Image: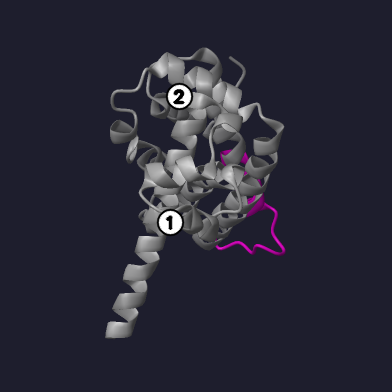
């Protein structure tokens, strides 16, 4: 690889790290204080950058918060592409999803009052201004996951419904698990709920 290629790769990794830091800061502050009580300047300061840098990456607080979900599903797609070809599809999806949900959780949730955190998240995600951004992130995330499923299964994104069905099912499962985790206010890791939920979907959602 050329020096220019290495430099470009480093720049992209730095940009991605900045986006992640800003998104996490937005989520943390808005969950603690409420969406309306947090300014762009507060988020930028928490991430160690300027408000101008924030505006270079995101159009507003809602987009910054929604990026967290988009990036996580993008990385599930990356992980899915890396799973062994011999692994059954839904097993590969479960392993890819759990890998991505597990990464970083321990550090992010250290010293956090889980009940207070979950209460803050419930209020934050109930904001209409944020729901539109989450909807847009969902659509983009499912499109990227469908592309990974199509590659793995040898299906066509334009002519075949299957990869889109799988991506929609995974997206719905993640949303259902996240919503249940917030409603229940459980201190248990979300990865346990996700394991169970994906197993149920893979089994065809048998009646309980």
87 horizontally vs 146: left or right? left
Residue 188, position in %: x, y? 38, 18
* Residue under label 1: 78
Looking at the rendered structure, the secondary structure element under dot 1 is: helix
Q: Which numbered dot is residue 193?
A: 2
Q: Is residue 71 above or below residue 185?
A: below
Residue 166, position in %: x, y? 60, 46
Looking at the rendered structure, the secondary structure element under dot 2 is: helix
Check contact, mark 1 vs mark 2: CB within 8 A.
no
Q: Is residue 181 visible?
A: no
- Say few, some or many: other residues with alpha carbon within 10 Å of mark 2 (under 14 / 14 to 19 / 20 or more): some
131 horizontally vs 9: left or right? right
Screen quadrant of the N terminus: bottom left
156 horizontally vs 30: left or right? right
- The answer to which image quadrant residue 98 occupies is top left
Kindly identify the residue that appears in the image at 65 percent across and 62 percent down: 157
- Region of the chain picked out in magenta, as a range: 154-170
Q: Earlier in the sequence, mark 1 or mark 2?
A: 1
Q: Inspect the magenta stretch and tell me whether residue 165 lies in it.
A: yes
Marker count (numbered): 2
Q: Inspect the magenta stretch and tell me whether residue 86 lies in it.
A: no
Kindly identify the residue that appears in the image at 41 percent across and 58 percent down: 16
Screen quadrant of the C terminus: top right
Q: Is residue 144 visible?
A: yes
9 horizontally vs 88: left or right? left
- The answer to which image quadrant residue 25 occupies is top left
Kindly identify the residue that appears in the image at 48 percent across and 14 percent down: 185
- Which is nearer the eye, 81 or 105? 105
- Which is nearer the eye, 22 or 96? 22
Residue 164, position in %: x, y? 65, 51
């Amino acid at each position: 690889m050329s020096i220019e290629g290495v430099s470009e790769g480093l720049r992209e990794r730095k940009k991605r790290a900045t986006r992640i830091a800003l998104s996490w800061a937005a989520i943390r502050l808005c969950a603690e204080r409420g969406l309306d009580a947090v300014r762009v300047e507060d988020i930028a300061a928490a991430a160690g950058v300027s408000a101008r840098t924030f505006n270079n990456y995101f159009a507003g607080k809602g987009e910054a918060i929604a990026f967290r979900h988009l990036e996580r599903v993008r990385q599930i797609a990356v992980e899915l592409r890396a799973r062994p070809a011999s692994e059954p599809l839904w097993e590969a999806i479960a392993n890819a999803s759990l890998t991505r949900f597990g990464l970083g959780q321990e550090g992010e949730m250290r010293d956090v009052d889980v009940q207070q955190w979950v209460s803050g998240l419930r209020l934050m995600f109930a904001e209409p201004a944020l729901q539109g951004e989450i909807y847009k992130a969902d659509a983009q995330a499912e499109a990227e996951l469908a592309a990974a499923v199509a590659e793995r299964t040898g299906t066509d994104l334009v002519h075949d419904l299957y990869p889109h069905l799988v991506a929609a099912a995974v997206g719905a499962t993640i949303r259902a698990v996240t919503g249940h985790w917030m409603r229940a206010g459980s201190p248990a890791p979300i990865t346990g709920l996700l394991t169970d939920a994906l197993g149920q979907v893979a089994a065809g959602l048998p009646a309980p």
